[in-house]
Image (cartoon, rainbow, N blue to C red):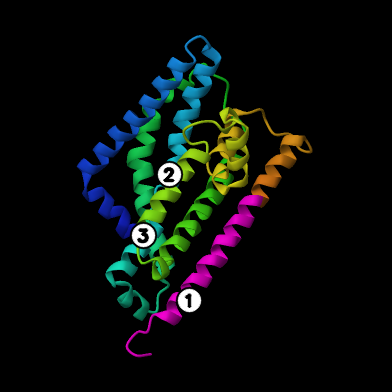
Amino acid sequence: MSFIRISFKNELAYRMSLIFGVFWTVFSVGVAMALWRYLYSDDPAMQSYMTQYMVLSGAIGGFYNFAVGHVIGTKVLDGSIVTDLIRPSNLLKQVWLTEFGEMLSRLAFNTLPAVLIFLPAFIGEPALNNIIPALAAVALGHLLQGFLQAFIGYSAFVLVEARPFLQITRAVSQLFSGALIPLALFPGALGSVAYVLPFRLLYSFPLTLMLGEPVEWGSSRFYEALGNYALMVGWIALFYVCTRIMRHFAMRKFVVHGG
């Protein structure tokens, strides 16, 4: 917990950074909202839907705004991971908790103010549904995103430079996750690709839960949601195992003090 507390305090020390973070979040969400409102200028129902969609997408993105893979990859690249391997603590746990603290501070002082600014967009609109199942999906998405990043970060022992692969993964995730464009609007081939990849589970799945009809026990949507949860757990397990394998490979390759 000390890693979380320290990183949280460090984030608070840079107040101007927090202010600009709020400004950027509001600006990016506002531009996306304006674009969708223009595209559906003759359809008020879709305007309302996309307004809520973009605000909620921005809020969900706050839970994935951490850089476990970047930190580990940088440590491998500059050699500072040698010191971390000497310590008895778990490097991945240490980095994850530090990034988690920074994420919490950004959620509190960046994402939350931005959501409150756009709160009037939800007044007079249908209430959000399936909040708890959607939050559970976001929590699993956090783990999925973290282990995927960690795997790529540890891959720096093989790839030397992990940042380009992290950037490519981020770009692909933004496109195929439904963060910017609802996957229902994707044409056949792109829609099929998005369905196979794990990224849709990060945004499209929780957004569909919140903006869709209530999920009733035993309904087709209930079993569809269960299938998505099972997929998330499967992807998390896969990237966790891959991370462990890559970390084991790194420990064998990296000799510390002639050990």
The earlier-in-sequence mark between 2 and 3 is 3
Tell me how far mark 1 sits from mark 3, CA to CA: 24 Å
* Secondary structure of residue under mark 2: helix
Q: List x then y, in percent, for residue 255.
A: 37, 84
The earlier-in-sequence mark between 1 and 3 is 3
On the rendered structure, is 224 left or right of 119? right
Give the class, few, some or many, for how many residues have Cα within 10 Å of label 1's Cα (few <14, many ≥20): some
Q: Which residues are magenta?
A: 231-259
Give the class, few, some or many, for how many residues have Cα within 10 Å of label 2's Cα (few <14, many ≥20): few
Name the residue at the front extreme. 189
On the rendered structure, is 199 left or right of 214? left
Tell me how far mark 1 sits from mark 2, CA to CA: 28 Å
* Secondary structure of residue under mark 1: helix
Give 156 or 122, whichever is nearer the viewer: 156
Q: List x then y, in percent, for residue 20.
A: 25, 37
Dominant SS type (magenta):
helix
Amino acid type at circle 2 is Ala
Residue drawn at 49 percent across, 52 percent down: 145
Determine which residue is flagged by label 2: 171
Determine which residue is flagged by label 1: 249
Examine the structure image and report whether residue 237 is included in the region drawn in magenta: yes
Amino acid type at circle 3 is Thr
